């Protein structure tokens, strides 16, 4: 088993609770991890990745409050210090990202530039 090291990002309590709720749903594939990362695209240049996926060769496993997640080792330079939050309100429902490395963000909040 690969060692788990301190995470370069943080999840709020509401984000952790929502991810755990999703993982507890019937039919969830327990061999998948929560993947956090970035990919090229979006209106500001890069888009956040937050999905369930299988661990790949270049991934590092992190753990926060018994929530294990994976991130490609090369993505941490874009995400270090980022906070993931879950907003369960009626007007704004979903995961939000607060990234101190972003020089600008798009109006939708899922795209950023460095």
Image (cartoon, helix red, strand yellow):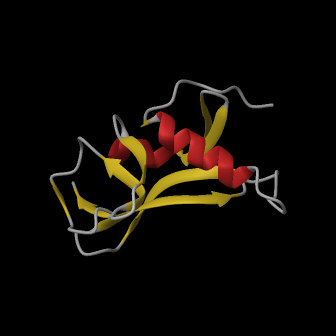
Q: Of residues 104 and 23, which is closer to you in this image?
A: 23
Does residue 62 appear to the left or right of 15 in the view shown? Answer: right
Does residue 17 appear to the left or right of 80 in the view shown? Answer: right
The answer to whether 43 is drawn above or below residue 51 in the figure is: below
The answer to whether 41 is drawn above or below residue 55 in the figure is: below
Does residue 63 appear to the left or right of 54 in the view shown? Answer: left
Q: Residue at x 48, y 60 (%)?
A: 49
Residue 51 lies, in percent from the top left, at: 58, 60
Residue 93 lies, in percent from the top left, at: 41, 61
The answer to whether 57 is drawn above or below residue 82 in the figure is: below
Whether residue 97 appears in this view of the structure is: yes
Q: Residue at x 53, y 24 (%)?
A: 6
Q: Residue at x 65, y 27 (%)?
A: 4
On the image, which quarter does residue 29 sit in?
bottom right
Q: Of residues 20 and 73, which is closer to you in this image?
A: 20
Q: Of residues 102 and 16, which is closer to you in this image?
A: 16
Q: Of residues 68 and 46, which is closer to you in this image?
A: 68
Residue 64 lies, in percent from the top left, at: 57, 29
Quadrant showing the N terminus: top right
Whether residue 59 appears in this view of the structure is: no
Total marks shown come to 0
Quadrant showing the C terminus: bottom left
Furthest residue in direction front, as rendered: 90
The answer to whether 110 is drawn above or below residue 17 in the figure is: below
Residue 15 lies, in percent from the top left, at: 50, 44
On the image, which quarter does residue 92 sit in?
bottom left
Does residue 86 appear to the left or right of 72 in the view shown? Answer: left
Q: Residue at x 28, y 62 (%)?
A: 109
């Amino acid at each position: 088993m690969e060692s788990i090291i301190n995470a370069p990002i943080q999840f709020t309590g509401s984000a952790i609770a929502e991810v755990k709720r999703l993982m507890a749903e019937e039919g969830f594939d327990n061999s998948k991890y929560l993947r956090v990362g970035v990919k090229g695209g979006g209106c500001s240049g890069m888009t956040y990745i937050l999905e369930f996926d299988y661990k790949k060769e270049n991934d590092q496993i992190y753990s926060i409050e018994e929530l294990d997640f994976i991130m490609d080792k090369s993505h941490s330079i874009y995400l270090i210090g980022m906070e993931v939050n879950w907003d369960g309100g009626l007007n704004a429902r979903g995961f939000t990202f607060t990234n101190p490395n972003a020089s600008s963000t798009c109006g939708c909040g899922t795209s950023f530039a460095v």
